[in-house]
Amino acid sequence: MLVASNEQASGFDARPAGSPAEAGQSTNASVTPILDVRGLSISFRGRDGITHVTRDVSFTVAPGERVGVVGESGCGKSVTGLSLLRLLPERTAIIDGEIRFDGRDLMSMRPKEVRAIRGRDISMIFQEPMTALDPVFTVGQQLVETLRTHYPVPPAEARERAIQALKDVGIPSPETRVDEYPHQFSGGMRQRVMIAMALICKPKLIIADEPTTALDVTVQAQIIDLLTELSENTGAALLFITHDLGVVAETCSRMITMYAGEVVETSPVDDVLRRPGHPYTSGLLRSLPRLSDRGGRLPFIPGRVPSPNAMPEGCRFQARCPHASEGCERYQTMTEIDRQRHARCHKATQLKLEGAV
Amino acid sequence: MMSRTKQLMLLNRLVQAIPIMILATFLVFSLLQLVPGDVAITIAGENASEKRIQEIRELYGLNQPFLVQYGNWLVNAVQGDFGESLLSGEPVLETISRVFPNTLFIVAYAVLLSVVIGVPLGIMASSRPNSKLDGAIMGASSLGVAVPNFWLGMVLVSLFALTWNWFPATGFTSPGESFTSAIWFATLPAIALCTNGIAEVARQLRSSLVEIHSSQHVRTLHAKGLSPGAILWKHGLKNVSVNLLTVISLLFNKALAATVVVETVFAIPGMGNTIVKAVLEGDFPVVQGAVLAMVITVILVNLVTDLLYTVLDPRIQQV
């Protein structure tokens, strides 16, 4: 049922938002995307057979663009993020589709070529700053290592660069902290170190996988501001994987909504906040608590994300959708709402869905 | 140099060592009372008169109450006087300095073999967990843990020494005399001692490395663009070094204890052999001195291990 071969992907033509031409129009005219993902289907081989995690995921990121990927837990956001750097376990992950970075096909590259891109051209920031750094090396050693893995920088200069990188992410007295170990840093400070490490080689794309989820609310805002500022200054594109729609609204120009392993909507942030094209996006937006509505009941989406082993035929959201009707039992392709907005819903052009604004 | 906290810690540990040494020697002394036989009769020789035996008892203080005897020994030992063997008359310190290097040599040899063979096996097994290679190495190491070293010692002697004549069956040259000859004599005993060690090093290293490889910070290392080799040799091994060190120090102490059996099988003039002989003869000054030397060695090994922990893992501040 969920065999996601290339033929199927092209047969359903489910990537209107993903084609370079359109992505170019939607963001920056005549610029080829830095990241172009087409028909990405990821499955895992397990004891009980194959589990399909994502199907036919297509999207693009233009150079310097900030794109948010949102969705509930378990909808394939993080797996998609990891697959972009080929970080999924090779023995169990089956990846189908195309990932083009800067015009080069990441999927067909040899491991050595992929390693040259990791940390240099594409870097990644993870959710858990408490465990993402090696506990037995100083943060300076880890920063220097990242730099020297990719560039022949002499040790003394690399150390200076590491101190500068710590300064750039707002760590006080970086000259002394550079020689401290991760356990001597707080969670927020560690995430700053992670950001410093992600930026030290001046990458073209940063993938941030829920970088603030594990942090205090007050620290979250600082980290998000920092990421936005630094990506703006360095011109790095940012793929922001999060379930926090507020963050996306604040920082990103485009939003990709994922549901049950599929991209269900891509749209500029301003548009999607006002008028989402997919009932699921609308549900997510309506579930955001608003200070103006105090005392009222918070709307929520009934039910839960179907498990990968029990995906319904047709629209994967139909069981939870208030607008479900005839036609939802069929496989849903991406429907164009306008040039920049696409939703995986056959009623996308008819529905008038409520947004967050 | 050493930080103040480390100096304090060191002092603390040395103070703690004193009651351990007293307790260990007291326990061994008490147990000696249970060993059958009378050292006075042994010293007096065959057909000695009851009067002669009584004189010997008085001469060596053997007629005094057990606690007084221990007290006398302790008072002298604190002053550095460990007495002489009741039988040979050789000062205990001389005996120990003669035989202990042999034992330390064999133990160090065995621990070295355990690490040199166990580490590559552990790394190989961890590189593909649950593969056939992993299964084979882990299966063999289960066997290695289970095999008793005295039995293995006898098998080695019968095969390599008696049947094939590759190594000497028994005997020893002290490493100070001739190092190559010492190696030649020590190889079979070291092999008999190290099988458990190889197995334990391999198992511990495998499980630690498998855990590290699936950790989040190793994922970060992959995301930084490091090669699998750099991740294993630089980050992996440093991360598991504390576990490995723990295993090695335990191995050292275990091997030290196992020499009692292995030295007897190979007839090596070491501490184990000396202790066994002295216990059987009731030569308590030798037993006490040897036990004290062993206890001090174990305490020192543990202390060095704890100091190395703080070097290997920055999160460990004090011990």
Image (tube, coloured by chain):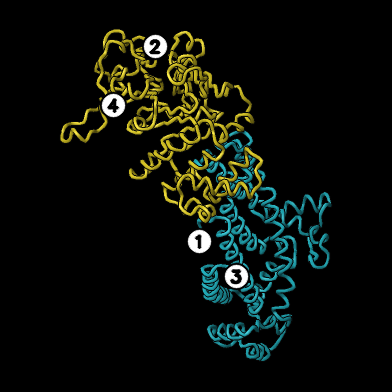
Chain colours: A yellow, B cyan
> Residue B225 at what x, y percent from top left?
59, 36
Q: Which residue is mark 3?
A: B295
Q: In terms of sequence position, does the residue under pointer 1 or pointer 3 come before the other?
A: 3
Same chain for mark 3 and mark 2? The answer is no
- Residue at (37, 22) in percent of width and height: A268
Q: Is residue A243 visible?
A: yes
Residue type at tag 4: Leu
The label on residue A333 is 2
- Position of A263 relative to A220 (above/below): above
Quadrant assignment for the C terminus of chain A:
top left
Residue type at tag 1: Gln
Q: Are marks 4 and 3 in contact (CB under 8 Å)?
A: no
Residue farthest along the left direction in this orientation:
A295
Provide the secondary structure element on which disc 2 rests: loop
- Position of A173 relative to B143 (above/below): below
Q: Quadrant of residue A107?
A: top right
Q: CA distance from mark 4 to mark 3?
A: 70 Å
Q: Which residue is mark 4?
A: A285
- Position of A228 relative to A280 (above/below): below
Q: Nearer the viewer, residue B289 or A176?
A: A176
| Crowd rating for badge 3 (residues with CA inside 10 Å; few <14, some 14–19, many 20+) | some
Provide the secondary structure element on which disc 3 rests: helix
